[in-house]
Image (spheres, helix red, strand yellow):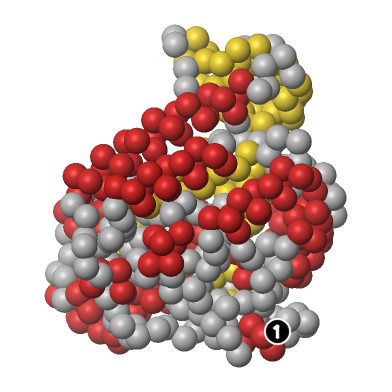
Amino acid sequence: MKKAALHNLGCKVNAYEMEAMQQMLEGAGYEIVPFAPGADVYVINTCTVTNIADRKSRQMLHRAKKMNENAVVVAVGCYAQVRGRELAVDPDVDIVIGSSRKSDLVKEIRTWEQAHENSGSNAGSMQRTQENTAADAAQTDIGSWKRDTSYEKLEIDRTEEHTRAFIKVQDGCNQFCSYCIIPYARGRIRSRDPEDVVEEITRLAATGVKEVVITGIHLCSYGADLKDNQHNHEAVTSVYPARNCMALLQLLQKVHEIDGIERIRLGSLEPGYMSEAFIRGLAELPKVCPHFHLSLQSGCAKTLRAMNRKYTPADFSETAALFRKYYEHPALCTDIITGFPGETDEDFEECRAFVESIHFFETHIFPYSRRAGTRAAAMPDQNTEAVRRKRGEVLRQLDHERRKEFLRWYLGKPVEVLFEEQTEVNGRLYWMGHGREYQKVLLMDSRDLSNRIVTVTAAQIVGDDYILGY
């Protein structure tokens, strides 16, 4: 039995695709082993969202070949898509598979192995057997747009987390934010058939999974390309999908009916795309957790325009208010990019003040990453790395304060927790799980609470991130 090791970089969508590829390899007879010396095949699911992600992708590919120079090293995913030509001539990479051909993984490895066996040469000399694969992966060099039209079907029968499963329902993005490389890596919006989604989640529920996270590259555009969507004409004749998310709501209503599923979470949502009817519809589904990631990127109107985002701070504020209209204490989370080209001290202060006004539960802060081929890379007035990081520290301090503010609200109140695992905090062993708003909760209990939902009372805040329950 040949051994395969896998390493994933990037987002929740990548995590789902990695699990699907692992199960494909298992079905083909491979033994899955840790990402360490001794494997026959190394699969790295790459990411290209930032320069750091690019560097990590390259490092992991090179590390794999060093662990076994005779192993087959496979570069899969977004970095492989946009940098396919570079990887095609990298002596440490044997197979390059773009972001829409992950289902061909086993076939490509088999083709490589057969050519290797027939030649009798070492693994490194056989890299050119995959030139067509590499060329396909590189068909969308920066500056063009990968125009996939069909959704690549990947699926899983179980999840390694056991309690929570990520479910990919959508791929691609039509937005072309000026800083972002992902539309070039992932292509146009494509949606998964809702019946396929329901079938997969039903199988997972039968294995004991209680919580699912519905994910996609641009989740709010789910269904815009499906034939039975009433907004289909608008979606396929315009760069922008229909702005109401009702197709996504209809999918969630189907998932809500699946026996065994107790909780539903959503991946990142776009402000300006969600109608009040959509948010009201979410609130009518008790299994949908009041934990919503609303992608902001900047609280400055000028910077948002430069980013080519499709909303204003006022639009975002209105969306946040709608969630608070229909939920008592929703966990609103966001992303912020600091030091975008042209962002002045005054612009950043406008952003900081806006972020402070929204009272987010969590704010994920990223210094601007210059991506070759994007419009932002050629913009004047590029900020220095020092400026980007300094502004990030200001927002991280605010995030620290707001996180504690959010958690303190629960003190003395009941919190429904799905417990996942035991963890040690301050030298003591606790069961750790997440509340519906994704707050981390600790409980000292002698019972096995793994994958059990228990209601506890919030007693105190421990450290920066935990609620202690009793």
Residue at image point 40% right, 55% down: 10
Residue 118, horizontal then vertical, whole percent? 25, 81
- Front residue (pair 277, 145): 277
Residue 449, quarter of the rendered image? top right
Q: Is residue 317 visible?
A: yes
- The tally of labels here is 1
- Residue 62: image location, x then y, percent: 19, 57
As displayed, is residue 409 above or below residue 365?
above
Work out which quarter of the rendered image holds the N terminus and state it.
bottom left
Q: Nearer the viewer, residue 55 or 219?
A: 219
Q: Residue beneath label 1, please? A: 232
> Residue 266 at x, y = what percent?
64, 52
In the shown orientation, is residue 336 left or right of residue 257? left
Q: Pick the residue in front: 376 or 380.
A: 380
Q: Amino acid at mark 1?
A: Asn
How crowded pointer 1 is (Cα within 10 Å; few <14, some 14-19, many 20+) is rated as some
Task: Locate the C terminus by quadrant.
Answer: top right
Identify the residue at horizontal 76%, vertical 45% (top origin).
325
Q: Quadrant of residue 268?
A: bottom right
Q: Nearer the viewer, residue 129 or 413?
A: 413
Q: Residue at x 65, y 43 (%)?
A: 291
Q: For numbered disc 1, what is the local secondary structure? A: helix
